[in-house]
Image: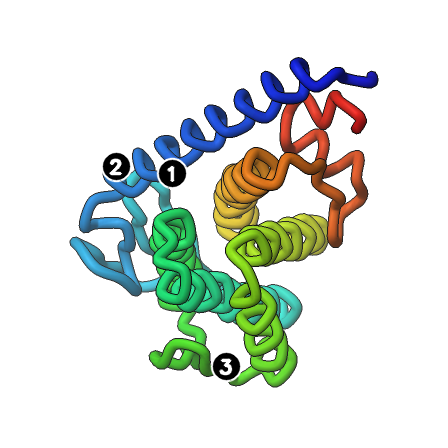
Amino acid sequence: MICNDFAKNIYFSFLLLTAYIWRIIILTEKNAAGSGYSCCGGRGHHGHHGHHGMCGSIALQGGDLLEADKHSILYLHEEEKLARDVYLSLARHWDSLIHQHVSESEQRHIDRIGDLITVYHLDDLLSADVGVFRNTDLQKLYDELVARGQKTAHDALLVGAWVEEADIQDLQQALTKTKNPDLINTYEHLLQASYRHLNLFVRTWMAQSEMFYTAQILPQATVDAILGAGQVCQI
């Protein structure tokens, strides 16, 4: 529908409020995770016995993996690092709490996939250095995204939305290609988190720019569905 100036002001004020709510949700996840967010590869109490592991209340069954599943785990592990490192770089550049908070969430995602790597006895090839990647495509993408996000603070938010759209697309594709319960549970958990992150970046950008968001990777209808009510006004 077409909105007048008053309605648009109310709408964008509402978006700003909901952006703050999404920040609170993400911070709540952080506090709930505490220092024990990883059972095998990260901080806190962890351990596994034979081919089995426990991550909090989530049991990892272990066992044999298809080659496609191994590739999926290792690629998504480094892709989560890409998200974290981009957000860390932009958080430092803009002194952005939003990027800082989401980078901490992405670290938990890295550790979550790291648990799969440990339980399934895969080689952890992740670089410990920020901004360094074994995958040359991800290395190039990191450099491009950071350069784009350093142009303006609004661009930094759009870069965050781009990264989350890319994560959502790759996780959705990975879910269609695996039948492994451990991978399905892990990927679905990460997918829900990416929905929340996309909401945060997009709603904050829309509230600050007073513009409507155009999907960068996913179909527009998919993004609108993730955002909830969608973009109800047309300028």
Classed neighbour count for the residue bearing mark 3: other residues with Cα under 10 Å, few (<14), some (14–19), many (≥20): many
Question: Which residue: 75% across, 22% down?
Answer: 233
Question: Which residue: 76% across, 17% down?
Answer: 3
Q: Which mark is residue 133?
A: 3
Which of the marked residues, 1 or 3, is nearer the chain's N terminus? Answer: 1
**166 over 203 or under it: above or below:** below
Distance (Cα) linking label 1 and label 2: 10 Å
**101 over 203 or under it: above or below:** below
Disc 2 marks which residue? 32
The C terminus lies in quadrant: top right
Distance (Cα) linking label 2 and label 3: 30 Å
Name the one closer to the observer, 138 or 159: 159
Q: Amino acid at mark 3?
A: Phe
The local secondary structure at tag 3 comes to loop
Name the one closer to the observer, 2 or 198: 2
Disc 1 marks which residue? 26
Which of the marked residues, 1 or 2, is nearer the chain's N terminus? Answer: 1
The N terminus lies in quadrant: top right
**Is any part of residue 195 visible from this angle?**
no
Residue 67 image position (x, y, % from top left): 63, 72
**Is any part of residue 32 visible from this angle?**
yes
The local secondary structure at tag 1 comes to helix
Image quarter for residue 130? Answer: bottom left
